[in-house]
Image (cartoon, rainbow, N blue to C red):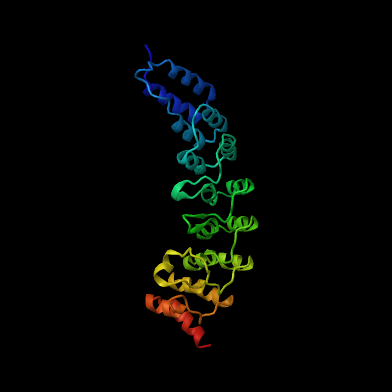
Amino acid sequence: MSRTETQITSDLQAAASAGDLPKIQALLEEWKSLDSSVSSAPPLQELLSTAARNGHAQVVSHLLQGGASVDVDAVVSAVDTPHIAVFQAFVDGGFDISTSLGHLGDLLFLSVGHIDLLKWVLAQGANPNRSRSGMLSALDLAVMKSSSEAARLLIQHGARVKNTNALKTAAYYGVLDMIPLLLEAGADVNEIPDYEEMLLSEREHGLGTALHEAALGDQPEAVELLLEKGADPALKNTLGRTALDIAREKQHVSVVEVLEKRSQM
């Protein structure tokens, strides 16, 4: 009695999860013996994602050779528990690491939280200055994740810190360890970037400095640190507001206290 697609599919998934390539090969041959008038194509994409998630590079290579393609699901599955050999199999199978993965950006963005993978992606020549949806850079993401190791890696590979959102992102979210790191890398504490990629907060509150962002984000410690590093509290944003104006407007009491104390010095 012949088996059904459902039964074979279940066994294929188990074999892909276990990395049992001989079993997969045998099951795919069994699939070919099914009545072609009622059977569909084998679920190669689903098997690819399963194998990638479990780190089975040899199975990944075989499936790619058999007609599977590297799609978003496969890449995301591989990133969940990153195995460099799987990504190398993707590349060997024709995958371009700069391929857009929609709102996720590309592999560089997905690798920011996984240092070994980030090192590999950068070694493959990934552009550290590519932005996601024209807004967020990989360095911005490293800042938001408070990953100084990722930030340093990106900077070492050419990520820009001047005329970017990186310092302002650190200020807005109060990621204090990132502020000196970015300043040491060349960020200007009083810079108002002259580019079109505005932070979401700036669309309403005006384009300003890192100090403006710290005030807007209600980050008194970041405000104090930026002032220590030379931030000018008298600077106005593109709507004519100082950081103190913003803090008062948003009723961020702690920030107001810090800035008012500085104005009295």
Q: Nearer the viewer, residue 261 or 239?
A: 239
Q: Residue 91, position in %: x, y?
A: 58, 38
Q: Residue at x 49, y 50 (%)?
A: 105
Q: Quadrant of the N terminus?
A: top left
Classify residue 46 by image quadrant. Answer: top left
Q: State whether residue 78 appears in this view.
A: yes
Q: Residue 200, position in %: x, y?
A: 42, 64
Q: Residue 60, position in %: x, y?
A: 53, 32
Residue 15 versus residue 187 in the image, above or below = above
Q: Residue at x 48, y 63 (%)?
A: 197
Q: Nearer the viewer, residue 35 or 17?
A: 35
Residue 64 versus residue 183 in the image, above or below = above
Taking the image as shown, residue 153 lies to the left or right of residue 7, namely right
Q: Nearer the viewer, residue 244 or 100?
A: 100
Q: Residue 229, position in %: x, y?
A: 59, 75
Classify residue 65 by image quadrant. Answer: top right
Residue 151 versus residue 219 in the image, above or below = above
Q: Which residue is at the far bottom?
A: 264
